[in-house]
């Protein structure tokens, strides 16, 4: 157990370690997020990040994309972490190369891991430094600030998309591949939908590569340049607008502690009253057709339906 004069992050880590050992937090359960820790113990987000980093290094918790940090499961007992000594080597830190050098690539990778697990709102330069086990100002030698870091993160995850030389034949197959690749990236990194408003596009190499692929599909079909750019923006905004729900759901779960299913259960009486009022006949008819099984929102199905409808409409503009 951490002593009263121990650093705050060690005392908090000890409490969460106790909850895991006592079974209050079982394998697979979400542990408090950085923001929840900061609120409950009245500490800075960087301190909260250091708590989760400590437990992660001990193997007690792990980051799970779009869920947060969860209990990793039973394992060998690990002694509580101690504050690092200046003489201890830091080469094993995820933000350092084998020779101990902090790099921009590793900073970006650590930041992406935080955003994937906790959401973009939980990201801070101090939090990244805490995750990497380096001084709070060290990342600034490689990244000018949080805004610059977020742009680097966006370009890094957009690089996960690939554009094969043997492109699908026809404009439709190529647009489908590009849109689905962009959707997959947003699926893996929901925070991506929170940046780059359509009216302020970012000059990121891998975002331009995506646009180049999509514009290449539209080129040569009798469309004027403005229409080509508008269609590219329309498809991008459709993917982004659908994907933004992924991050919002994660934020809602973190804020309320309720899953989507639990929240819907809590609203059942209110929806039943609206249906019973008779004021919304079309809504009542459609909802009633689902029977006892009800309706489950499937964003992947929504995405596919919207993409198909959009491309069907686009066929009327393109002269093959």
Image (tube, rainbow, N blue to C red):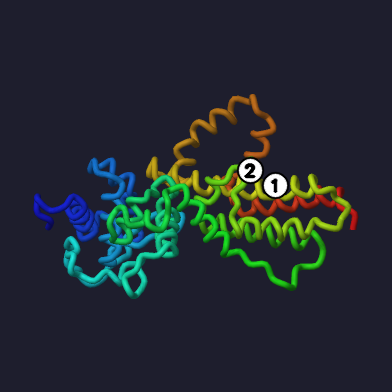
Number of numbered discs overlaid on the protein picture: 2
Residue 177 is left or right of residue 9, and the answer is right
Q: Visible in this render: residue 107?
A: yes
Label 1's element?
helix
Which residue is found at the position 31% from the left and 53% from the top?
A: 137
Quadrant assignment for the C terminus: bottom right
Whether 263 is drawn above or below 17: the answer is: above
The x, y position of residue 173, in whole percent, is 76, 62
Q: Visible in this render: residue 293?
A: no
Residue 283 is left or right of residue 147, and the answer is right
The x, y position of residue 82, in whole percent, is 17, 62
Q: Quadrant of residue 111?
A: bottom left
Label 2: how many residues lie within 10 Å, few (<14), some (14-19) or many (20+)? Answer: few
Q: Quadrant of residue 60?
A: bottom left
Marks 1 and 2 sit apart, C-alpha to C-alpha, by 7 Å
Label 1: how many residues lie within 10 Å, few (<14), some (14-19) or many (20+)? Answer: some
Quadrant assignment for the N terminus: bottom left
The x, y position of residue 12, in whole percent, is 20, 51
Residue located beneath label 2 in the image: 198
Label 2's element?
loop
Residue located beneath label 1 in the image: 233
């Amino acid at each position: 157990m951490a002593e009263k004069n121990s650093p705050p992050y060690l005392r908090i880590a000890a409490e969460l370690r106790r909850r895991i050992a006592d079974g209050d937090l079982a394998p697979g359960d979400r542990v408090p997020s950085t923001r929840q820790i900061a609120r409950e113990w009245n500490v800075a987000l960087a301190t909260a990040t250091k708590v989760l980093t400590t437990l992660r290094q001990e193997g007690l918790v792990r980051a799970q994309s779009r869920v947060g940090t969860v209990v990793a499961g039973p394992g060998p007992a690990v002694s509580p972490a101690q504050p690092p000594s200046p003489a201890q080597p830091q080469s094993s830190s995820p933000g350092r190369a084998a020779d101990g050098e902090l790099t921009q690539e590793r900073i970006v990778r650590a930041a992406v891991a935080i955003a994937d697990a906790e959401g973009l709102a939980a990201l801070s330069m101090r939090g990244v430094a805490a995750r990497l086990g380096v001084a709070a100002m060290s990342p600034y030698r490689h990244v000018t600030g949080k805004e610059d870091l977020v742009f680097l993160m966006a370009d890094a995850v957009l690089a996960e998309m690939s554009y094969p030389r043997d492109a699908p034949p026809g404009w439709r197959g190529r647009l489908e591949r590009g849109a689905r690749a962009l959707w997959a990236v947003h699926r893996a990194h929901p925070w991506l939908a929170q940046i780059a408003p359509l009216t302020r596009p970012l000059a990121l190499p891998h975002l331009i590569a995506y646009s180049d692929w999509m514009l290449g599909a539209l080129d040569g079909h009798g469309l004027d340049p403005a229409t080509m750019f508008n269609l590219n923006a329309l498809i991008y905004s459709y993917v982004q607008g659908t994907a933004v729900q992924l991050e919002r759901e994660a934020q809602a779960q973190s804020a309320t502690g309720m899953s989507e299913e639990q929240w819907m259960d809590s609203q059942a009486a209110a929806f039943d009253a609206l249906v019973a009022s008779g004021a919304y006949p079309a809504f009542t008819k459609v909802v009633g057709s689902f029977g006892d099984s009800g309706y489950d929102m499937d964003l992947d199905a929504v995405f596919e339906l919207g993409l198909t409808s959009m491309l069907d409409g686009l066929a009327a503009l393109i002269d093959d």
